Structure formats: C-alpha cells, structure tokens
Amino acid sequence: MRVQMTRRGVSIDVSGSEMKELQRQFHEEYCILMKQFVEPALLVQLQEKIAAAGFYEKHNRDVGDEVRMRSDPAGSALEFLMNDPALYAFVREVSGIGPIGAYQGRVYSLLPDTGMMSDWHNDMVAGRLATMVTNLSTAVYGGGLLQFKRVDSDEIVTSIHNTGFGDATLFKIDHSLKHRVTPITGTVRRTMYAGWFLGEPDFTTLLKGRLDTHSVGA
Amino acid sequence: MATLRIRDDIVYREVDGVIVAFSLETGEYVSLDDIGTDIWRLIEQDGRVEQVRRAMLAAYDIDDASCDQELSSFITMLQARGLVNVDPGVSGVGSLDPTGKGD
C-alpha cells in the first residue's frame, strides 16, 4: 500500500483487500496510520522551512495550549498538496464521508516540559467530516500518544504513537467519540500538520483567486 | 545543449487539467495554460530544450520560428518565476536558444 504526498501531488496505490482492511480499521478502531505519507525528500524541505518559521502561542479552549506556525510557504505548500482530488477520493472510500470541498489545517507544535497536550475533545465543529494529522517532527518525541475512547466509557479503544517521520493518521470524528494527545515528555517537540476535511468551501475556487496565470502564445 | 530542470523547491499538480505550481521559496503560485502544461510535462520527461522543441513541432501546427519564439519566451518566464533551472550544457552557451545552436 502506498498513500504518499510527493511534490508532484498525492500518489495512491491501494489494493482492494488493503482498502477493506483500512475501512475496517477506520470504523472499528477509529483511526488509520499511513506510513511515510510525506515523501522523505519533500519532508526534509518542509521541515527546513518550518524550522525557520515563526510560531506563536495559541490556547484552544477546553483542549489545551500549543504553539502554532505563522503564515509560511511551508503551510501553503501543505495545503495545496493536501487538497488533491486523489486524496479526497481515497479518504472518502476509507471513511464513507460525503463530498469533500477542502482540507484546512495548521502546523503546530506541542513543546516538552510545558505540559502542552490536547485534552479529550471530539473536533465536532460544523462542516468537519474527518481529521488528518501528519507528523512533521524532526526527531522521535516522547509521550504525545493519540488516544480514542467512546464518550460513554473511560476505556481507551485505540492508542497510536505517530512518531514515524512523515507518517499520517486519518481518523473518525463523531459525537460518540473523543480523542486526546497525551503530554509530551523528553526533550523533543512534537510538530504536526493537523486539520479537517470539510464539505465546503471549495478549495479549487479559493485557489483560482490566488493564481498568476501564464499562457503560451497568448 | 541547454537542459531545463524543475527546481526541487517547486511543488505542483494538475488543477482542472492544467499545471499549478507553487514555490516554497517565494510562496507564489503560477498556473499554466494547456500548451504550457504540455511543455511542463515534456520538461519532466526530458528537459533538453531541443527535445522539447522537437516534441512541440510534432504536436502543434506551428512553424520553426514561431515555435522558437514561443518556447524561448516560455522558458524565460519559467526562469523568472523561479520554476526551473537552466543548465547551459557542455558547450557552455548560456543562451536559451531552443535550436541548441547557441548565440
């Protein structure tokens, strides 16, 4: 199986049996893991840009604190590549969600020795269909487990330590579920590109407003 | 013979049938038209300018002079927008002369 963001767009190679297993995982365990979702060479370029970018502190009410990357070409490149119809189709087939208009995300870090974490929450804001989080960390962080439980139970159903460089999780959001990220331990920051597939707006329409178009023979 | 290479800091994909490129360096988007997209694909396959020129002449109803003018203009735009690097080739001729004959 390969689901990979390259600098030429997203490449998908998933067999029928692999897709069935992904669908089972998504619905029964609420989350799938895509190894090396970001092509290693592209990942290094993005990490270099992110390292040079500015971050600011952001408090997410009832969830926790993070530091969030300011507007930067690395964030724009990720947004552009994530909003690929091939990835939309893959996500829809795995999850069964309705039509996707856009993926909107942000690059953020949880810093060690700060108590930064994401407490139990469900991501359920109007228009969000599914969550996808890509690991952009430059080293293996401690703690920072992504965990899922049902709202009517304290039992952890799934726990994922997404520390593989460029690996990504796609997970289910629903009023009956909650997820959290446990506090970071050790000395390494946990940097992610996290966001949601949305029914709208339509990303292509937004993109066309940003384009500088060049014609041949005009 | 000059050779074109899409820069490593460029990400791109097709949007509604044409190439849209984004520069990690400048943070700018550039959208190509249908013919520009064809040329981009040719550059991906074999960046030698002479090969691109031959493919264009074979694909389009265009005379040599017009082809050279359009291709040269397009390559200049790609360079100016930081989308490609141009290797002038073993002759050391820095010209973008699509015929590969140099200045």
Image: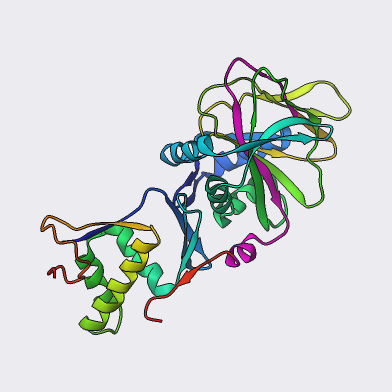
Image-based side of A174 in relation to A145, left or right: right
Q: Residue at x 68, y 58 (%)?
A: A101
Out of A48 and A128, give the one closest to the viewer. A48
Residue A1 appears in the figure? no
Look at the image and tell me in which quarter the C terminus of chain A lies.
bottom left
Q: Residue at x 31, y 73 (%)?
A: B73
Q: Is residue A184 magenta-colored?
A: yes
Which residue is at the far top? A186
Residue A121 in percent (x, y) is at: 81, 33
Q: Is residue B71 magenta-colored?
A: no
- Quarter of the figure with residue A86: bottom right
- Quarter of the figure with residue A84: bottom right
Which residues lie in the magenta part?
A180-209
Image-based side of A22 in relation to B11, left or right: right
Residue A105 in percent (x, y) is at: 66, 45
Out of A131 and A86, give the one closest to the viewer. A131
